[in-house]
Amino acid sequence: ATGPAVALRAGFIGAGFMTTVHSRAARAARAELAGVASSSSGSAERAALELGLARSYSSVDALLADDAIDIIHVCTPNTTHARFALAALDAGKHVVCEKPLATSVVDAAALVRRAEATGLTATVPFVYRFHPMVREARARVQAGETGRVLTINGGYLQDWLAEPHADDWRVDADLGGPSRAFADIGSHLVDLLEFITADRIVRLNATTRTVYGNRSNNHDIATEDLVALVVEMRGGAVGTLLISQVAPGRKNSLVLEIAGTEQSIRFDQERPDELWLGRRVGSQHILRDPAELAPDAARLSTVPSGHPMGYQDAFNAFVADSYADAAANSLAASTGVESGCSPEGLPTFADGLRAVRVTAAVLESAASGAWVEVLS
Amino acid sequence: ATGPAVALRAGFIGAGFMTTVHSRAARAARAELAGVASSSSGSAERAALELGLARSYSSVDALLADDAIDIIHVCTPNTTHARFALAALDAGKHVVCEKPLATSVVDAAALVRRAEATGLTATVPFVYRFHPMVREARARVQAGETGRVLTINGGYLQDWLAEPHADDWRVDADLGGPSRAFADIGSHLVDLLEFITADRIVRLNATTRTVYGNRSNNHDIATEDLVALVVEMRGGAVGTLLISQVAPGRKNSLVLEIAGTEQSIRFDQERPDELWLGRRVGSQHILRDPAELAPDAARLSTVPSGHPMGYQDAFNAFVADSYADAAANSLAASTGVESGCSPEGLPTFADGLRAVRVTAAVLESAASGAWVEVLS
Amino acid sequence: ATGPAVALRAGFIGAGFMTTVHSRAARAARAELAGVASSSSGSAERAALELGLARSYSSVDALLADDAIDIIHVCTPNTTHARFALAALDAGKHVVCEKPLATSVVDAAALVRRAEATGLTATVPFVYRFHPMVREARARVQAGETGRVLTINGGYLQDWLAEPHADDWRVDADLGGPSRAFADIGSHLVDLLEFITADRIVRLNATTRTVYGNRSNNHDIATEDLVALVVEMRGGAVGTLLISQVAPGRKNSLVLEIAGTEQSIRFDQERPDELWLGRRVGSQHILRDPAELAPDAARLSTVPSGHPMGYQDAFNAFVADSYADAAANSLAASTGVESGCSPEGLPTFADGLRAVRVTAAVLESAASGAWVEVLS
Amino acid sequence: ATGPAVALRAGFIGAGFMTTVHSRAARAARAELAGVASSSSGSAERAALELGLARSYSSVDALLADDAIDIIHVCTPNTTHARFALAALDAGKHVVCEKPLATSVVDAAALVRRAEATGLTATVPFVYRFHPMVREARARVQAGETGRVLTINGGYLQDWLAEPHADDWRVDADLGGPSRAFADIGSHLVDLLEFITADRIVRLNATTRTVYGNRSNNHDIATEDLVALVVEMRGGAVGTLLISQVAPGRKNSLVLEIAGTEQSIRFDQERPDELWLGRRVGSQHILRDPAELAPDAARLSTVPSGHPMGYQDAFNAFVADSYADAAANSLAASTGVESGCSPEGLPTFADGLRAVRVTAAVLESAASGAWVEVLS
Ligand SMILES: NC(=O)C1=CN([C@@H]2O[C@H](COP(=O)(O)OP(=O)(O)OC[C@H]3O[C@@H](n4cnc5c(N)ncnc54)[C@H](O)[C@@H]3O)[C@@H](O)[C@H]2O)C=CC1
Ligand SMILES: NC(=O)C1=CN([C@@H]2O[C@H](COP(=O)(O)OP(=O)(O)OC[C@H]3O[C@@H](n4cnc5c(N)ncnc54)[C@H](O)[C@@H]3O)[C@@H](O)[C@H]2O)C=CC1
Ligand SMILES: NC(=O)C1=CN([C@@H]2O[C@H](COP(=O)(O)OP(=O)(O)OC[C@H]3O[C@@H](n4cnc5c(N)ncnc54)[C@H](O)[C@@H]3O)[C@@H](O)[C@H]2O)C=CC1
Ligand SMILES: NC(=O)C1=CN([C@@H]2O[C@H](COP(=O)(O)OP(=O)(O)OC[C@H]3O[C@@H](n4cnc5c(N)ncnc54)[C@H](O)[C@@H]3O)[C@@H](O)[C@H]2O)C=CC1
């Protein structure tokens, strides 16, 4: 992936794990790593030093006020996303905002409208879209190889909160928002499902559990540890999704199996270079091989077949595509000529809103026990 | 497994695939393969010849009237089970009746009462219980290794009805009963789940689909091709189950993953000698090794570690245990002394009824869209 | 598989693990389980009772002298095979003799000649040939799908002798013969390789190790724990084979991967219902599906796709084919009319001799350090 | 991984696949991507533009003469490595030279001596060493968990030359050197084996085949398509290695299984975040989890458990370590104070020489048919 002619200047809000990952990707995309602001000047300074960013800012406002920054990465706890993303757009910056885009539908919808109004790039790291084999799966579904989709079997299981004392800001609704497991990882699963099938969940029925009401620092915890749900798709398929952050031995097990009238497809994020194609006769287990992939999958293959690609590679591709879009939008803004096209499969604020909507429906259904329609 | 001192004399109703499997198991259990009746004298004769049964009968009634038969295997289409099983009990025979035990709760409950009243052995081939690694999983759950069960991820996927023209008597409600996919294979999944966890589904919410309303011979088909459901267990766990007979590439994919507070366990029927034990640290992938298994799992291991066991082995064990139970019950009847114990984990008519109850709840929920309580 | 019209009457020498397995298979093949002799009357009696054999004999001679026995299964330690098998042939019995057929080439060759002279059935349980997917692999190689075979990657790893104190009669050259790991399991690997490829090892270079010179009861042990070798095939392929009985975690890991000019094929005995077909594009992972297999593989499939078959199933098929051959030979002897054909792929004494020859070449090469030609 | 305080200035020779991979890694290590020379000015210019390098040079000499370059990456065909690496050292540059370090032992040994004399960093991208799970395997072997190593089962199989017309400069001895498959990929396997076991191959016996004597452009091809060999290790282990570039379906299948007296370990490069630990009881299948790994494995883990790492991640780690070493050596040179330590597990020219020695022994043994000692 060739970077933009003139390097974008990237700023980061937050100094945690995601800022590390985003900044690596920004560097790989040949951006200028301009600066960082976080909850304190100290942590911002340390991050600047450690990550090799040009400077740190004493506040988010100071960062946003700097004209020498073109694009802002929002990498802070969930309940701050909407506020920072809006401020960044208001400051005329492109934005990459972490998921969940917001912790309410109202906020997320406002962000979508604002982004559209500005014409700035506004993306959300639904990063699993950037595994070449996810693109391959999507290309095959869309080429009709799968036939009409009948069932979906999806799961996203982790175990990092499996021990009672394990704790994190995500557990606290004030920082993480009202939904935890679903907002945090279920949102990825839903995005992946809708991305691969180019279909939409129209109804769902969910049940949730909070296994541990008290953890090390957080008490009377209201956010869910796990969710089980059935979904119906606009295209007629039905499916089951299981999301848990308390499943021992499952590290980051995002698995999606789609069965259609002609063929099944299975993707497992922990083995992202593989795809299972189920057929009545002649099922295949294919490995990523750029020579044989759909164009959009081959485009994201940066090393040959048999040379595994991973999470950071997917993240790099997401950021490269966000930056390419930002460069095109900036050019359009300065020249008045629309480029007219965005990189294939770029997850935007609209996709972020979509995940927030599904999350809201999950909470509503879990509360009422009834099927809930999901607005598109 | 040593057979009973005096060989049981076994009779079979039906002359299809299951009679082949049952009669192999009866032979391995050192029974006398006494005879068979089927829908016609001709098919019964052919089966007797092919399967090496001593004789054929011109009718089911003739078979049941023969005093030289101790135990009857009902291997006919679903809607005939209740009738034949009842007649066999009435004739004083032990009964192995195929699943679903009946196609209505009323009929199944009547069979349970009748079996109890007679003191005869009355079992249902929930045969997956007889894989040693299923026993191992159960022993581990019951020893508390898993901790409190939190989530269940179950699936039973097949593809033999994936092609629109594929057809079978099971498709026809008059022969197969009102539920197809769930009664046929979902019942196995539910039995396995409840057997391993020693817990019960208390509520469920299901959605079903009939993908093909017309097949080669059957038209206006009302029975479901697939079911997606969420379940809640008495012990508090929640889970998702997906059942389909139209999932390309999935031959007989019965997979169950249980996550508890301490550990996860996964069993995959297509690799029945393996078990995955998920842990925060040190997950294991264990192979059947008689030297290391729980007693009840070791008991069912008939060949050493690394020498695969399969479906027929499980069936043989089920029939051997049914026969041991029948021999003990016969002895008790003739001596008046109760043996007092049945082979561990033997699936009885009560278990058959249980599966019928869950099936009824699935159909009810699919019709109403609401959560349905499952009576125990 | 239908048994012979008149049941064969089977006798067994030895009362250990293999007699259990052979007698189960004989029962499944609808033979009469006539009797057993072992190292003592007591053990023979116990075996008769436990395995459900009609009677026990006080000596091997008594068993062989009984006219009411048609076929003898030799299931004793290796160094006794040649003697018992010869005596059985001399007594006019068909023979199933365990591997290794003999512990010297001279003895094995004599047995082959004697068997040919008598016209009796004389087979060796190279039982892995009887997995349907092994037949499928062989059919594909022979149909040219693989192209010219280029490389072979074979291994047979176990761990039951991995602990220093583990012990067995096989360790003692007086009972097991001069080669241990290779004669015991390497012989299976070589048979499988030559069976699937229909090719022959023409040269080899081997190195062996005895890791534990002393075990619980055996001391100054001279037989090898492991062997590593390179082989050249008549057809031009080269390959590596690794055989070990001291490989922790490997229970019965017999794996063979063959790469040809067109395609690769991999078979793993611990997952015997699967086959990997490697291709430049479109590699497949196929499951046993009777509907799609080569005739000879479908013939051995006794349960549908997705219903796993195992070790005992393979053994049953081997014995059924041996018995079918014996019945045909007996008929030919009594009528003077040759049936002219044996069941496809039946491993005979000639195959037993072949494995003994390769074993001798392995020991010779390990001693000299030089490449050794293997006579065919 | 924090980069050096002052960025190294990196230059690249060659403009092919490896220069792409090396330059990405150099960027991730926060080096200055100073320039490139290749076989023509044109290709160098194109590469500079595409890869984002500051400038191109019209010749290798011009690049080497530039004082604004600290470290040279040699990414050209094999027979040029020795010449360019020597010239770079002579020009006072640190060198990262692709494998094989040279195509003769004499040349490789000269390079080792020259590198030692200069005190410059001189490394070879045996990049598979940089997978965290390889470090974990090594740490476990060295902590004695495996016990004394008994057997080695290694393979490196590819299929990119499986089609007769497939062609490449590697096929031509003038560019690739006298050995092809072994020098190209066998060298990685040998390095990995010796790295993980901290042991050495002392003797080997190899056989090679050239399957296609003619390809699209190359004719009368003398270099081998495949190699099969047995090895003996100084520590007493024996093993088999199979290397092939004509194995259909195998993309980059580098697999190593080591069995010791206590435990087995298996690493598969295509699933680099996993490790199988074989035990008599309780075999484990572990996933990379930074929280549980040996320090040196945790150090190389840049994303959490369940977030796959890949080939480029390993390459980045190799280059980062090479650069850290170069920075330390430069500092030592300018201050006269030796840092005294190099990053753990850095593959140097000495390791490059080692692989060349083993390659020479393989060719010698293949020619003579005899066991050949490998000098250390
Ligand atoms: N797309 C993906 O795959 C992933 C997305 N995420 C998302 O990234 C976001 C950040 O997650 P992590 O990096 O794991 O969290 P973290 O806890 O490691 O880092 C959060 C950072 O935000 C800073 N921060 C907190 N409040 C702030 C405020 N008011 N103003 C400025 N800085 C503030 C903290 O000091 C900290 O440096 C979350 O929204 C999470 O959902 C996280 C992991 C993966
Ligand atoms: N436990 C398990 O794992 C399995 C259970 N089954 C159950 O076994 C039963 C039989 O299934 P299959 O053998 O596959 O069916 P099938 O169609 O192969 O055989 C059914 C047999 O019943 C005979 N039959 C039909 N109506 C009859 C009547 N009124 N009186 C006497 N005989 C009659 C037919 O002629 C035929 O021989 C079913 O209830 C099915 O659910 C089937 C497969 C696996
Ligand atoms: N085809 C295959 O897959 C397998 C073949 N085998 C072969 O089967 C044979 C028996 O092995 P196992 O059953 O495992 O051994 P085992 O030790 O369990 O049984 C051997 C039996 O032979 C009896 N025996 C020993 N000496 C005797 C004598 N002189 N006369 C009469 N009986 C005598 C013993 O009392 C014992 O009952 C071996 O040759 C072995 O290589 C074993 C396992 C698998
Ligand atoms: N460590 C690893 O995992 C890998 C190492 N390699 C090694 O990297 C080296 C390069 O391989 P690739 O990049 O695949 O080859 P390539 O053919 O893609 O690139 C070679 C480049 O060298 C240039 N070149 C050729 N002769 C030259 C000369 N005399 N002067 C200057 N430039 C010249 C060519 O123009 C071309 O740009 C090889 O030695 C190969 O063994 C390759 C792949 C993986």
Image (cartoon, coloured by chain):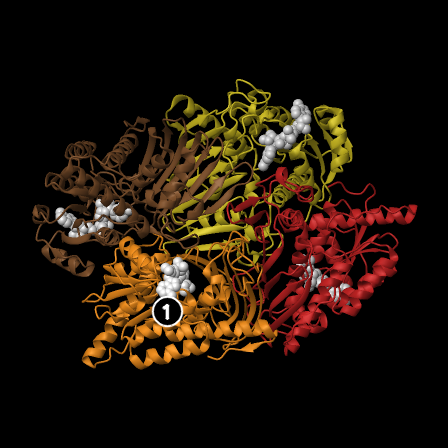
Chain colours: A yellow, B brown, C orange, D red
The subunit letter for the residue under badge 1 reads C
Q: How many marks?
A: 1
The image quarter in which residue C67 lies: bottom left
| Residue B254 in view of the camera | no
Q: Is residue B78 above or below residue C19?
A: above
Disc 1 CB within 8 Å of nearest ligand 3 atom? yes
Q: Position of residue A210 (x, y in %)?
A: 48, 24
Towards the viewer: C375 or D121:
C375
Q: Quadrant of ligand 3?
A: bottom left
**Left or right: D138 with respect to D57?**
left
Name the residue type under label 1.
Val
Towards the viewer: A192 or C14:
C14
Q: Position of residue D106 (x, y in %)?
A: 79, 69
Q: Is residue B128 above or below residue D228?
A: above
Q: Quadrant of the N terminus of chain C?
A: bottom left
Q: Position of residue B185 (x, y in %)?
A: 30, 43
**Which residue bears the numbered disc 1?**
C124
Q: At x 33% / y 44%, what residue is drawn?
A: B130
Q: Position of residue A133 (x, y in %)?
A: 53, 49
Q: Is residue C354 above or below residue D236?
A: below
**Left or right: D323 with respect to D294?**
right
Q: Is residue C261 above or below residue D32?
A: below
Q: At x 36% / y 41%, what residue is drawn?
A: B296
Q: Disc 1 on helix, strand or loop?
A: loop
